[in-house]
Image (tube, rainbow, N blue to C red):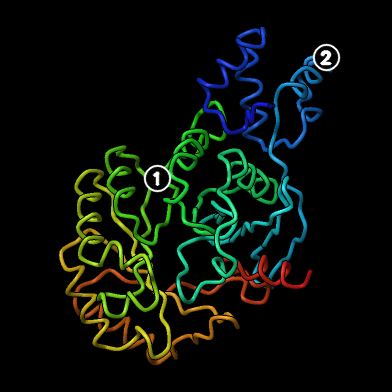
Amino acid sequence: MKTDIASLNFDRLAEFVAENGLPKYRTEQIFRWISRGVLSFDEMTDISKDLRAKLSETASLPVLQTEKKLVSSDGTTKFLFTLEDGEHVETVVMKYEHGNSVCISSQVGCRMNCAFCASSLKGLQRSLTAGEMLAQVAVANRECNVSSLVVMGIGEPMDNYDNILTFLENLSDPRGLGMSLRHVSVSTCGIVPKINELAEKKLQLTLSVSLHAPDDETRNKIMPVNKKWNVRTLIDACSNYIEKTGRRISFEYTLIKGVNDSVRHAETLAKLLKGMLAHVNLIPVNYVMERGFEPSSPESIRRFYDTLKSKGINVTVRRTLGSDINAACGQLRHKTEAGK
């Protein structure tokens, strides 16, 4: 079986190079090409043809074919990629005044089954490799100069924990892309043991917690993960993460009409987060036909925002980008595969 060298960290790649009788300096050459997102060995132009042929016999690179590329009127670009096994994932490039950001997927599908999300409509097919995640970043970099990254696309990153760690290591390695983890956000719906493990790593990334409800009664209805790790257990893990890393947590809160958007919910959320080094990001839910949830009205969003603000909570309302190209997680993939 060929070795997936795009999913090896630098030290493991060095071992592969040595095992194949290649000079040590080839490690950095190959690693640099992988970081640029090459999808074939022929693209490694500073390596001889003979060596490229030898590598192709023993090693493999990610397959990431652009199935669709959609550009929104606001400049947001969405890619639908086909992988080696025919599965699909999405990557979104977002342009802001302060720089460009890429949102990548970490899995094909998702097993978390959050009630409002398109990503888990077909369940989990498989996790992405570290190389497949890095290749998404490289494609985005060819589109524009990316200065920040969020792992918030299709999938639950903490359900692909080991590959995420390798990806982050390779992403930040100065011999490759060298992106500071301070410009990286990784999301989770609340897999508490992995949050605690990540806290011990003391990585300087931003943890984004998909909270979406401040109490167990509401959260149980829309997020099955809450039945295993409830709100109090999750908040305790978040407090531990802040203490261990010194990093502020971003709480993502999708506002759903008539479900979690009342003033009472806002007051409960404010009480829950009082005194924490935290930021709340309010997000009007994206309509998914199979899910049926509708976004909160502008008036409800304003009331929710004002309530949190009056209680001293750091809060913003996310600007909606790419709505005309199905830029929300999983929508384009689902529409494409449903049309087959």
**Amino acid under disc 1:** Arg
Q: What x and y, as percent, mark residue 162? A: 45, 39
Q: Which residue occupies the foreground of this view, 297 or 211?
A: 211
Residue at 70% across, 46% down: 142
Pointers 1 and 2 in contact (C-beta within 8 Å): no
- Image position of 23 (left or right of 169): right
Residue at disc 2, secondary structure:
helix
- The amino acid type of the residue labelled 2 equals Asp
Residue located beneath label 1 in the image? 182
Going by the image, does 194 lie left or right of 329?
A: left
Q: Position of residue 160 (x, y in %)?
A: 47, 47
Name the residue located 30 percent from the left edge and 57 percent from the top edge. 249
Counting every numbered tag in the picture gives 2
| Residue 120 - label | none
For disc 1, the neighbor class at 10 Å (few under 14, some 14 to 19, many from 20) is: some
Q: Which residue is mark 2?
A: 50
